[in-house]
Amino acid sequence: MRLPRFFGKKRGHRRTGSQAWGSFGEAVFYAALVAAGLSFAGLLLSGAVSIGPESAVPAWSHGWLWVFVLLIPGALLAFGLAGVVRTVRAWGKSEERRAAAEGLSTLLESMGQTADASPVHPSVPACDDLVNSPGTILRYRLPIESPESWALVGMGLFAALWNAVLVVLAVSAGIDIASGRVEWVLFAVLVPFASVGVAGIVLFVRRLVLTTAVGTTQLEISDHPLMPGNRYDVLLAQGGSGTVTSLVLTLEVEEMASFRQGTDTRTERVIVWRDVVKEWTNLQITPGVRFETHVTVAIPTGVMHSFVSEHNAVRWRIVVRGQPDRWPGFVRAFPVVVYPATSAEPAAGRHAVGVDEVSG
Amino acid sequence: MISIDEGNGATRSPTPRIGMQFDHKLRQYAPADDLVVRYDVEGVTPASVRALERTVLWYTEGKGEEDLGVHHFERLDDAARVAEALPAGTVTVRLPASPLSYEGVIVKIRWCVRIRLFFMNGRDFVSEHVFEVGDIAPARGVVERLQ
């Protein structure tokens, strides 16, 4: 039996060091959590550790307090037991065997109609959410991908919660003043709190104005999902008022990869292909009358299809970029799903490699 | 062939050589094609192998964490079946419609056949042979980085 090594190296596709010892260490860690949870719960239940003097809390709350106190060892036990079970289930199994087992459970889930991916095209995202809204002129109205709206909601929630706390503190300070007492510490806290509260409201209102000032953008498409080599009729409708100095409709492919960096999970997104479908300049949009136009979007042959896995994705989208005369520019993206071509002629090989690896 | 273990040199085990012959020229396959691969294992005796796994799978490479999708998995762990599968065998499977092999900028998708041998002494050996599904043009580069 080999002794464990505490430092491993990455050798191409593989890492040195024993996978078995790694799993053993993981199991010991989770078992220690279970032991800590059991010990803590035992001490609490045996009375060796108390939750405080009897007089400190009302008698009626003792039962509930015990439930809350037992949550701590309970959480340790649950986390530890889940880890032990997971480690034992994966013990001695290759990554292919584990992935095959996960694939089976995914298949069973998909039989319950909860799959994220298309059943005919594995790893291609399902487009059910993209075809459930009929268009007014063309077949489907595409939903907008709107991170701006979520930012607006987040800023609104922050401003509301912060200012609610501020109101509570201000009322408390007012009661103190009315009763003839002045809590200087409370006033010292109120001043920065009020500054942040006002700034939150100002930023929220500014964002709200910027988001709503430019009119809505609507996109309709003649068919969905899209296939390489096909052309699709697209209706672009832009609302608002005033002059839009430039409006550009593009078709884009985005790669997205999420990875761990230290304790953080980061996501990187890059546009790897962009085709300008059409560009308009100096549009005069009248309030109540949308700018509407038809364009044709062509999906080239030999391009990557939409793909999604746990940490990686290839996404297609139609993007509208506008630059109004008096407002900041806007970008509005409409995700679409591109299926792989039904038949493909193999081309010259790019990869034909074999890799051998030993582990133990 | 004998190799020295990288751990402490105490354990010596045979290092197999696994060769694969794909039934398509240049290892190029269209989606939904039948894949037939013949493998030959040299340098081990069936008696030293506890189990054998034959897998057809895709995995991602690039900036993100590796994702893995198993399309075909077969584990042979009784002596009679291991003896049948060594020193040579065949993996036959119909490929799916997707995902297709892709050479992106931060996302790459590779298809491969893996043969993994589990030895009686607890060690294992894996041999991986990449092939292509579909004919997707590689990404040319970064047009724009998004925040």
Image (spheres, grey):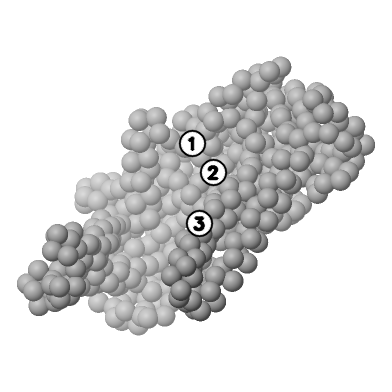
The residue labelled by disc 2 is: A308
Residue B31 quadrant: top right
Residue sticking out furthest to the top:
A137
Type of the residue with mark 1: Ala
Say left or right for A324 vs A170. right
Element assignment for label 2: strand
- Give whichever of discs 3 and 2 has the lower sequence position: 3
The residue labelled by disc 1 is: A117
The residue labelled by disc 3 is: A164
Q: Residue at x 54, y 37 (%)?
A: A124
Q: Position of residue A295 (x, y in %)?
A: 80, 26
> What is the chain letter for disc 3?
A
Whole-number angstrom distance, CA of label 1 to CA of label 2: 8 Å
Whole-number angstrom distance, CA of label 3 to CA of label 1: 43 Å
Quadrant for the C terminus of chain A in the image: bottom left
Quadrant for the N terminus of chain A in the image: bottom left
Question: Is residue B85 visible to us here?
Answer: no
Type of the residue with mark 3: Ala
Q: Residue at x 19, y 73 (%)?
A: A56
Q: Nearer the viewer, residue B139 or A62?
A: A62
> What is the chain letter for disc 2?
A
Residues at marks 3 and 2 on the same chain: yes
Residues at marks 1 and 2 touching, judged by CB atoms closer than 8 Å: yes
**Disc 3 vs disc 1: which is toward the camera?**
3
Type of the residue with mark 2: Val
Q: Residue at x 68, y 50 (%)?
A: A205
